[in-house]
Amino acid sequence: LAFDRETASALGKTLMSHEVEKDYWAICRGWPAEPAFVVDHDLDGGPGKPLKKPAQTAFEVLATCELALPSAGFPTSRYAWLRASPKTGRFRQIRRHLKHLSHHLIGDSSHGDGRHNRSFRTLGIHRMLLHARRLAFTHPHTGARIEALAPPDAEFEKALALFDAPAR
C-alpha cells in the first residue's frame, strides 16, 4: 500500500526481509506450559500448495482464565490470552500453529475445537478470537518508525473481560 511504485517496492522488500513486526492477540483453549515459547513447525502453503515451508511464531501468555464451562468430562475449561508474533507469513500460520500444540484458537471453524467454539457462542461471542493488534516498520524514505495499533472490537473485548488481567 503505497502512492508510488518506488515506495511500494521498498515496502515489499521490507516485508520480504522480515523487518515488519506483526503482533496479534489470540484466545486459545488450555494453558500453555511456558509463559513464552516459539513454535517452529513447517507448514504447507495452503490449498493446492503441498510443499512444506519453514514457519515460526513466537507466543507470549498475557493472561489465563478458568470458566465454569464443562468440557470433555471436566467441570471447567481453561483458556489463555496470547500475543502471537509470526516470524514468517504462511497461510493461516497462527491458527495452524495453535492447532499443532492442541491449543486451538477459539472460534476457528477450520482448525479449532467445536466444543469450545460452541461454549463461547453461549457467552455471546460468535467470532474467531484472533485480532491483528500491531504492525510496525521503518518508513522506507524517512527512516521514521511507523507503528499502527488497532483496538479490539466489542465482541473481542467481551472475550477479554473473561480474563483477570491488567489494563491493556
Image (spheres, helix red, strand yellow):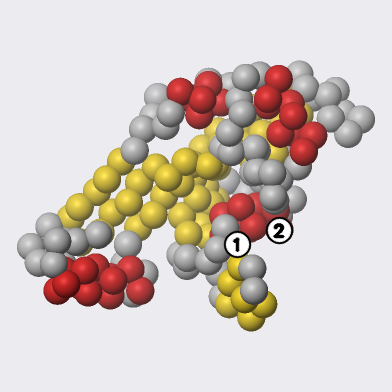
Q: Do the residues labelled 2 and 1 touch (CB within 8 Å)?
A: yes
At horizontal 22% and vertical 74% (from top left) the residue drawn is 9
Q: Hey, which quadrant is residue 49 in on the image?
A: bottom right
Whether residue 76 sits left or right of residue 111 in the image: it is: right
Q: Crowding at label 2, few (<14), some or many (≥20) Cα neighbours within 10 Å?
A: few
Whether residue 8 sits left or right of residue 104 in the image: it is: left
Q: Horizontal and vertical percent for residue 8?
A: 21, 69
Residue 100 - label: 2
Q: Horizontal and vertical percent for residue 5?
A: 16, 72
At horizontal 12% and vertical 57% (from top left) the residue drawn is 144
Q: Horizontal and vertical percent for residue 14?
A: 28, 70
Q: In this view of the protein, can residue 163 be seen by the observer? A: no
| 104 w.r.t. 49: above or below | above
Task: Please report whichever mark, 2 or 1, sits nearer to the chain's N-terminal start.
Answer: 1
Which residue has dot 1 on it? 39
Q: What residue type is labelled 2?
A: His
